[in-house]
Image: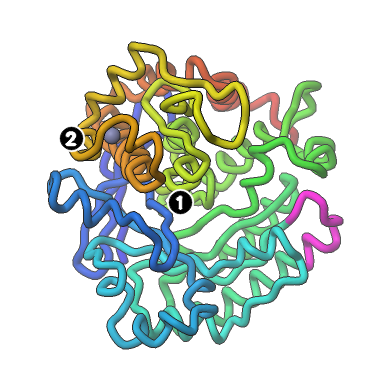
Amino acid sequence: MKFSIQKTCSGINARLGMLSVKGKKLATPVLFHGTILNGKPEPWIYFKEKHPNTNIRGLMINAYEIISSQRHKETIFSEGIHQFLNFNGIIFMDSGGFLIQKNQNFSINVDDVMEVYRKSSPDMIVSLDYPLSPTSSEEENIKNWKKTLENYEIMRKEFPNIMPVIHGYSKKQIKLACNAISAYEPKFLGIGSLVPLMRSVKGTKDIINLNGFSREKDYSSKKYVVDAIKYVRDKFPDGFLHVFGIGSASTMHLMFALGVDSIDSMGWRLKAAYGAVQIPYTADRFLSSLGGKRKNRPIFNDEEKRIFNNCKCGIHEDYNYEHIDAKFEPKAIHNAYVFLQENLKAINEIKNDKYYSFVEQRLKNTVYFNLFKYSLKKRYTQTTLIG
Ligand SMILES: [Zn+2]
């Protein structure tokens, strides 16, 4: 596994890089489309027929799903994960440790994860981590971090390129984690536990109080996410950095602007399951006011509908509007394509050194615009940092 930085951007930390794994090359920043075992649809197969030159760039799948699937485990072990998913690109396998975040009593055996990594041959793998929870005490979170570090020490002996994951809910914790990990000089690393902080969930108040980055009154857990990522980015300037779980079409650009090299997202499926589709520049939309799970669904206006109908993903030629409205699969394929296009645009804009204004435009009407501005402010006024 190799990673090299090819170009940096003016005004923001975004950068272009080249990731090489097992003879496969991928320009970064990259969005890995998260998928589930045997999940339908498989946009990478659909796109191969429709437009082979614009296909899903990388997939992320969860090792725990394989561990717990009696049905598919043997097949995956005998033919490998690439054959099973029918995807030749880079497959990034997560341990499934994030499931622990929802249920702290949930356990995953490190030997089982290592067996899956060994036998299913993904291209990139992650150390089994114990994510922190905003509702856990500081002691519990420190205990989780110690277990995460122990697993990394065990797993890296067999898999030297395995990705360690930094976790921390204060500057102090992030610093400790970075120091512990830097002893191993990793070339690839991830940051986890941040997903709940991007939402306004219970328990984030303590994180705001104890953050250690800023004393400003309107500090938020979202600002903490920005500060934590910037801190890790600064500590490992040359390392390939992945941020786990934060990837909508908007947050993708915020992450890339912070110098994150890769993200993963299951959003294309989740939004479609909810009945929603994406188009650039706007929040999630519904095709009609019929059905669905909630009232007052934001539906397309005429201009948005025109953009949607002109999308080149393929489903708009194959199905009529009513069919797309009624079915999960075409919506998921469309969403997968929008994510992919946004990723490709990001790369292109960084290449042309116009990503700064592109991100501004993309985030202008979202709740992330102020966060983007905040990330820029921090970059130039280091005096607001404590310590
Ligand atoms: Zn489409």
Front residue of 274 and 202 = 274
Residue 310 image offset from top left, x and y in percent: 22, 24
- Rendered residue at 53%/65% (across/down): 164
Which quadrant is home to the C terminus? top right
Where's residue 170, x and y in %?
A: 74, 46
Name the residue: 53% across, 44% down: 246
Q: CA distance from mark 2 to mark 1?
A: 38 Å
Instruction: Please give the range of residues in magenta.
Output: 133-143
Query: Label 2 is placed on what type of residue?
Result: Glu
Circle 1: is it few (<14), some (14-19), or many (20+) Cα within 10 Å?
many
Q: Nearer the viewer, residue 292 or 67?
A: 292
Considering depth in this image, is 142 or 283 the residue closer to the camera? 283
Residue at the disc numbered 2: 317
Q: What number of labels is visible?
A: 2
Q: Is residue 210 magenta?
A: no
The label shown at residue 241 is 1
Rendered-image quarter of ligand 1:
top left
Res. 380 visible in picture: no
The image quadrant of residue 22 is bottom left
Q: Where residue 257 is drawn, which disc sits there? A: none
Residue drawn at 34 percent across, 84 percent down:
75
Q: Residue at x 73, y 30 (%)?
A: 220
Q: Which residue is most to the top? A: 302
- SS at mark 2? helix
* Residue 212, percent from left and from top: 77, 39
